[in-house]
Each structure stands twice: as C-alpha cells, then as structure tokens.
Image (spheres, helix red, strand yellow):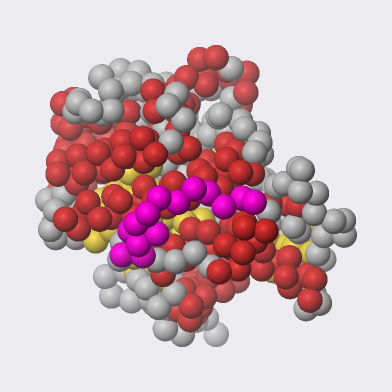
C-alpha cells in the first residue's frame, strides 16, 4: 500500500541559488569585482574547463522568463542572494542599476506569488575588501554591516525573510584551511578569526535589521553535517563531538543560542587558538540571535578517533579526528558525495531537541551529476530518475521529523536551473531545468516535472 506524505499548510516549496552563480553580467552594469572575478582573471586554469563567473546562467537578463519557469513548476518561494559588489561597488555608494535590477526581480517574484528569501553573503567577498583582509578584518565586519543596512533600507518593505550568511564554514574551511578557495591560506589561527568575525558580522547585521523595525524576520543559513562516530567507544564519540563543534556548533550555537559551546572555547584555549574579542562583542552575539534557521544538507561526516597525537605545530581541525568509510556507505556515483537521507531527520530532531525548536527550512538539498548530458533522451529531456529518488527519500525523512514535531517550514532544492559553482563551474549539474551553455536555453528535466507536482499538491 502506498503512503501519502502531506506537508504542513503554507509549506514553502522552491529552490536556492546565489547571485554570483546565476546572474552573470559579472563586470557589467556597475558591478565591481569580487574575489571570484579576480581569481578567474589571474588563475583561470583553476576553474573547471576554464569557465569563469562572467556569464553563469544569465539570470541578470533572463530573470523574467526564469521566474515564469519557477511559476510553471509551482514554486511559492525562491531563495537567492544579493551581490555585495553589485549593490555597493566601492563599498559605500549605491549602484542605482543594481537597485533597479533587484527591485525588478523581487517585484516579479512577488507578482507571481513567489516569496523571495534573500541572503546577503554567499562566498562573494568584494575584492577591495578582501584586500583589506576579508573576514580577518574588523573593518570588513563594519563594511558588511553597512551593506546589510543598505539592503534592508532599500528592499526591506518587500523582503520579509532575510538571511545574513550562507554556509559561513565554507570560506573558513576552503579559504583558510584547505587551500581550495581564494585566498588559499592554510592557517588554523586565522581560520578561527574568520569564523568568529563572520558570527560577529551576522549579529551586527541582525541588530541593524531590528533597529529598523521592519516587518519581517532574519536568520542565517548553515550547512549542517551530522558527525557520526564509528563506534560508541569513548575515543570515537569524542572525535565526532569535536568535528561537530568545529563544523556545526561553531556557527549553530552562537547563531541560535547566542553562546559558543564551553567545550569549543576550552579546546581553542588549550591550543592557543582563541581569537581576540573586544568588550561587548560576545554580548552583541548573545543579544542578536536569529529568528529562523536555513539548513543546507548534502552529506554527513563519518568520524573515528585519531590514532596519532595532536601536532600543535601543524594544527588543522583534522588534527583531532579522522574520517573513515562507513561500511554501509552509499555514494552518489555522479558526484562522489555520500547519500544518507536520514541525516536530514537527525538534523530536524537535533534542532527540535537542542535548539529550542526554532523555525527552520531546508535551504539547499540536491544531487550533483557530472556529464548529465548522458541522460538526455531523444526529446531533449534529462531523465534524472536518480534525482527524483534522492529528493523523495530525503523528503520522507524530513516529513518524519516534521511529524515528530520539528518546526520546518520549507524545502528548497539546490537548484532551480543548472548553475555555475565555485571552481567546479558547470561540472556538477543540479538544476530542475537544464541549461545549454552554448545557447543559454533552459529545458525542464524529469525531476522538474516531478517537483512541480509535489509543490502543487504539497506532498507526494
Ligand atoms: C553548496 C553551496 O554547498 O554546494 C553552493 O552552497 C554550491 O553554492 C553547492 O554550488 C554545490 O557545489 P558543487 O561543488 O557540487 O558544484
């Protein structure tokens, strides 16, 4: 007998995207360079097939038609970001063309009954601010606050749900630990500063938002990676707890509870990693917690105890734990990430039990596929049954979490149409619509048809 999964009334169905990954027009219409524009200019060979952020998916020009495509698949929300370097090219003065563009996008969405959920920072540090130290600099924290205030003042009547950051761990991990994203630093002490300053910047922006007394809510988007220990031995459990502290709770606790976990503070103190904290800043974080949480979920971490001693001259998060291959692991054969649908349920229950059952929504969940053209059928439709199964299984677990009382108000796939990704460019396709990079034409995939029905019927 089949089971029907119905979601709560007014559940938000949509997709997530970000400015740099979709807009294109990256150095046009008054936009200044961000670190991605700059990096592509100096080291294009790092980007998959040499594809940079200039064109991406051309949303800047095609947004009206794209919004009709969203409507066609029954979205009632769309979460994306504003480009900091488009809105404030010199950090201070507003680019009127950007104001027009974002007003037009928001108006068009609202006219079509699609709620815009707008994020402020999605990895796209303006170049001139990176040159001042990026998130390592308190001046940049202030510059972000100015940007946030400007956005709230300009668009706050239209936007009722804001978020400050998307995945603040990513600039930390990729930019300051893994030598992967610009500025490619490997330094745990500097990484901790970047992490702390992003939390400070988020709290300041939240404070500014509330001071404006606008009607709406403000949150943050975190990518939560549940850390599962290999066994229930003390060593494995402790190692998994440390991974959880670094990758999840460093952001989750200050954002939602207003406090850093004691265990994290002690660990950082033991290894002389505590950042400088100015008087009043921890109070600011405590007083400005989020109204809601966005959660991106792709895959969990599988953790075991480290067999070697921590080398304090060469510290990285991985100095404290090792990863291991879970014997029951299932991989996405087309992207190389573990697929573990129950993770979304564990997150739902963790938020309910340990984070005051704060309202939250799935801000990203999706399945990347390399060479997706191999699944095109004769009519030109991508037959992505694997993605339908991926969504269905995650939604079943999410539904269970909601039935058990977790306060989840929406589900956003990554992503609406194939879009450009950081370094990977168009290597991994995720869209409900396929984008032909030569013609910029969009075509609905089978998963898009499926999603359309789910969104229309509020379940499946
Ligand atoms: C998410 C990011 O973590 O992963 C997105 O928020 C990104 O911006 C997505 O595009 C997919 O990444 P990738 O490397 O598979 O293209």
Q: Residue furthest top?
A: 42
Q: Residue furthest right?
A: 307
Most foreground residue, 207 or 125: 207
Quarter of the view holding residue 64: top left
Does residue 341 sit above or below 205 in this rendering? below
- The answer to whether residue 266 of the structure is visible from this angle is yes
Most foreground residue, 196 or 91: 196
Q: Is residue 457 left or right of residue 217?
A: right
> Quarter of the image containing the C terminus?
bottom left
**Picture coordinates of residue 121 (x, y %)?**
38, 42
Quarter of the view holding residue 338: bottom right
Name the residue at 57% across, 36% down.
175
**Picture coordinates of residue 276 (x, y %)?**
49, 48
The region drawn magenta spans 272-287
> Quarter of the image containing the N terminus?
bottom right
Q: Is residue 387 left or right of residue 18?
A: right
Q: Is residue 105 left or right of residue 392?
A: left
- The answer to whether residue 457 of the structure is visible from this angle is no
Name the residue at 59% across, 57% down.
247
Query: Is residue 328 magenta-colored?
Result: no
**Picture coordinates of residue 231 (x, y %)?**
80, 74
Name the residue at 14% across, 41% down.
154
Does residue 236 sit above or below 75 in this rendering? below
Name the residue at 50% across, 15% down.
41
**Picture coordinates of residue 450 (x, y %)?**
44, 58
Number of marks in the rendered image: 0
């Amino acid at each position: 007998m089949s089971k029907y999964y119905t979601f709560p009334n007014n559940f938000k169905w949509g997709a997530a995207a970000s400015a740099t990954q979709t807009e294109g027009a990256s150095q046009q219409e008054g936009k200044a360079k961000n670190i991605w524009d700059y990096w592509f200019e100096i080291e294009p060979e790092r980007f998959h097939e040499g594809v940079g952020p200039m064109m991406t998916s051309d949303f800047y020009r095609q947004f009206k038609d794209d919004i009709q495509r969203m409507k066609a698949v029954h979205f009632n929300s769309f979460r994306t970001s504003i480009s900091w370097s488009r809105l404030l090219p010199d950090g201070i003065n507003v680019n009127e063309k950007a104001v027009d563009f974002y007003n037009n996008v928001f108006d068009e969405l609202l006219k079509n009954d699609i709620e815009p959920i707008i994020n402020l920072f999605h990895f796209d540090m303006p170049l001139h601010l990176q040159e001042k130290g990026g998130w390592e600099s308190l001046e940049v924290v202030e510059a972000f606050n100015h940007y946030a205030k400007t956005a709230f003042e300009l668009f706050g009547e239209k936007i009722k749900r804001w978020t400050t950051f998307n995945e603040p761990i990513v600039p930390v991990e990729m930019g300051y630990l893994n030598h992967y994203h610009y500025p490619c630093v490997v330094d745990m002490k500097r990484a901790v500063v970047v992490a702390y300053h992003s939390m400070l910047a988020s709290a300041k922006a939240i404070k500014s938002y509330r001071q404006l007394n606008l009607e709406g809510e403000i949150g943050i988007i975190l990518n939560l990676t549940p850390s599962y220990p290999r066994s229930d031995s003390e060593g494995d459990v402790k190692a998994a707890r440390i991974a959880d502290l670094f990758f999840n709770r460093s952001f989750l606790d200050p954002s939602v509870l207003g406090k850093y976990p004691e265990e994290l503070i002690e660990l950082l103190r033991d290894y002389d990693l505590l950042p400088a904290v100015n008087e009043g800043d921890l109070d600011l974080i405590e007083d400005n917690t989020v109204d809601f949480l966005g959660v991106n979920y792709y895959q969990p971490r599988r953790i075991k105890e480290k067999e070697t001693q921590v080398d304090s001259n060469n510290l990285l998060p991985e100095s404290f734990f090792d990863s291991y291959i879970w014997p029951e692991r299932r991989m996405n054969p087309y992207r190389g990430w573990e697929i573990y649908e129950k993770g979304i349920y564990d997150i739902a229950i963790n938020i309910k039990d340990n984070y005051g059952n704060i309202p939250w929504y799935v801000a990203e969940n999706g399945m990347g596929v390399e060479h997706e053209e191999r699944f095109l059928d004769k009519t030109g439709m991508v037959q992505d049954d694997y993605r339908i199964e991926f969504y269905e299984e995650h939604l079943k677990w999410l539904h269970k979490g909601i039935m058990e009382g977790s306060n989840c108000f929406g589900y956003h796939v990554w992503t609406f149409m194939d879009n450009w990704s950081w370094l990977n460019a168009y290597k991994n396709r995720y869209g409900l619509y396929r984008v032909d990079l030569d013609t910029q034409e969009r075509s609905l995939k089978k998963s898009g048809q499926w999603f359309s029905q789910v969104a229309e019927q509020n379940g499946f």
